[in-house]
């Protein structure tokens, strides 16, 4: 019980610290998920706390991810009118993003000679962690690797998507929301909400549709090629 309280408190304090830093310096490279992770790793290293000890105390936080995702339903509800208006664009855009995300990953890793287990762990990188872990295990991958790849995809997409949208002049909330939602799941959606509630709502829908589509695509890829 003491370990649970200590490790949970440590995790939450690091996140609060990361949020504080981001508010002072709102730079994409200082996203709370990045700074909080660095702070946490530094403390674990400084006090020589084994990973097993940390995860034994704070591992339960993994299960609240689903609750956080469900909370995105509120801005979704508030923006129902715009979602209905652009439902076809949302569906087609997310479908294209899902297919490209899965098959580009498979083709590139296969050409580079990456082993089957790593490929299976990498394929669901663009969906939320809870879904990605199950998909990776179903395809023969490792859940821990899948979680890492999901985080990397979320962080890099969140950092790059405002820049890419600016470079290629994507200014409409639907284009921006679909792009980040289908590529960078909940982390990207949280960033989209900073720009506008409409963009965040569209990203939330794209994230959900992407999870459904990728859940269909990956078993097919695994069955045919693995």
Image: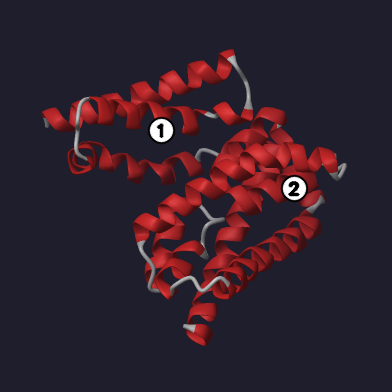
Residue beneath the point at 45% across and 58% down: 131
In the image, farthest residue toward the right: 169
Residue beneath the point at 79% across and 60% down: 88
In the image, farthest residue toward the left: 1
The residue carrying mark 1 is: 37
In the image, farthest residue toward the top: 24
Quadrant location, the N terminus: top left
In the image, farthest residue toward the front: 112
Residue beneath the point at 51% across and 17% down: 21
Q: Is residue 43 left or right of residue 136?
A: left
Q: Is residue 58 left or right of residue 148?
A: left
The image quadrant of residue 198 is top right
Q: Is residue 91 left or right of residue 71?
A: right
Q: Position of residue 213 (x, y in %)?
A: 60, 67
The residue lying toward the viewer, choosing from 76 and 92, is 92
Q: In the image, is residue 216 above or below residue 14?
A: below
Q: Earlier in the sequence, mark 1 or mark 2?
A: 1
The 10 Å Cα crowd at callout 2, few under 14, some 14 to 19, many 20 or more, is: some
Mark number for residue 83?
2
Q: In the image, is residue 90 above or below residue 57?
A: below
């Amino acid at each position: 019980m003491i370990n649970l309280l200590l490790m949970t408190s440590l995790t939450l304090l690091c996140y609060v610290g990361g949020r504080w830093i981001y508010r002072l310096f709102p730079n994409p490279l200082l996203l709370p998920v990045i700074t909080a992770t660095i702070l946490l790793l530094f403390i674990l290293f400084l006090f020589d706390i084994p990973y097993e000890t940390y995860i034994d105390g704070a591992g339960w936080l993994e299960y609240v991810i689903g609750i956080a995702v469900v909370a995105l339903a509120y801005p979704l509800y508030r923006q129902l009118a715009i979602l209905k208006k652009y439902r076809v664009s949302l569906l087609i855009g997310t479908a294209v993003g899902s297919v490209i995300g899965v098959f580009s990953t498979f083709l590139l890793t296969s050409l580079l000679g990456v082993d089957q287990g790593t490929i299976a762990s990498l394929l669901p990188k663009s969906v939320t962690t809870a879904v990605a872990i199950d998909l990776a295990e179903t395809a023969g991958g490792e859940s821990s690797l899948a979680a890492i790849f999901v985080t990397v995809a979320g962080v890099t997409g969140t950092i790059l998507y405002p820049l890419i949208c600016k470079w290629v002049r994507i200014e409409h909330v639907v284009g921006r929301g679909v792009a980040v939602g289908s590529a960078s799941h909940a982390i990207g959606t949280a960033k989209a909400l900073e720009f506008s509630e409409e963009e965040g709502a569209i990203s939330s829908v794209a994230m959900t549709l992407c999870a459904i589509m990728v859940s269909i695509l990956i078993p097919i890829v695994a069955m045919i090629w693995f």
